[in-house]
Image (cartoon, rainbow, N blue to C red):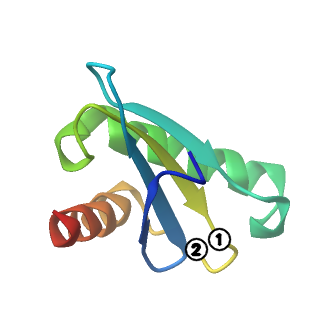
């Protein structure tokens, strides 16, 4: 993933996308300990997964996607995550 995937960088996060032969899009979430304590990291993961579940169409189709969060990530809710991802993916393709 990290070696062959396409990186799309946003403010405080990055999407690493790798198109494959699978028929559905899969999501992985990577959050380092520097982002915060376990409660904060788990909340971020829940919001990212829920955004993926409800708005799967904004993510690249038929590919593996890793959502990597960096320490500068500001959590403002699911709408903010959806808008940031939509902005990245529409600009790339």
Q: Classify the position of the C terminus by image quarter.
A: bottom left
Visible residue check, residue 75 = no
Check disc 1 and report the residue beneath it.
70
Q: Secondary structure at mark 1?
A: loop
Q: Crowding near pointer 1: few (<14 within 10 Å), some, many (20+)?
A: some
Q: Residue at x 35, y 40 (%)?
A: 52
Quarter occupied by the N terminus: top right
Depth check: 4 or 87 in front? 4
Q: Is residue 32 visible?
A: yes
Q: Residue furthest top?
A: 23
Tell whether 24 sits left or right of 58. Answer: right
Residue at 55% across, 38% down: 28
Tell me which corner region of the image, top left, top right, bottom left or bottom right, holds residue 91.
Answer: bottom left
Question: Which type of secondary structure does the marked residue at label 2 adopt?
Answer: loop
* Along the viewing direction, whichever of 9 and 4 lies nearer the viewer: 4
- Are the residues at dot 1 and dot 2 in contact (C-beta closer than 8 Å)? yes
The residue lying toward the viewer, choosing from 4 and 75, is: 4
Residue 2 position in % (x across, y down) = 60, 53
Q: Which mark is residue 1?
A: none
Q: In the rendered view, does 32 fall on the left or right side of 70?
A: right
| Residue 92 higher or lower than 79, as above or below | below
Residue pointed to by mark 2: 73
The x and y percentages for residue 61 are 22, 37
Please give left or right for residue 32 compared with residue 28 in the image.
Answer: right
Residue 16 in the image: state x and y as whole percent: 47, 55
Front one among 36 and 2: 2
Q: Residue furthest front?
A: 4
């Amino acid at each position: 993933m990290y070696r062959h995937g396409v990186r799309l960088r946003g403010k405080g996060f990055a999407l690493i996308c790798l198109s494959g032969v699978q028929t559905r899009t899969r999501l992985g979430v990577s959050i380092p300990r520097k982002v915060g304590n376990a409660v904060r990291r788990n909340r971020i993961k829940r919001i990212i997964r829920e955004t993926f579940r409800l708005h799967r169409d904004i993510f690249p189709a038929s590919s593996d996607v890793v959502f990597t969060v960096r320490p500068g990530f500001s959590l403002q809710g699911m709408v903010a995550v959806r808008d940031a991802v939509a902005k990245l993916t529409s600009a790339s393709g």
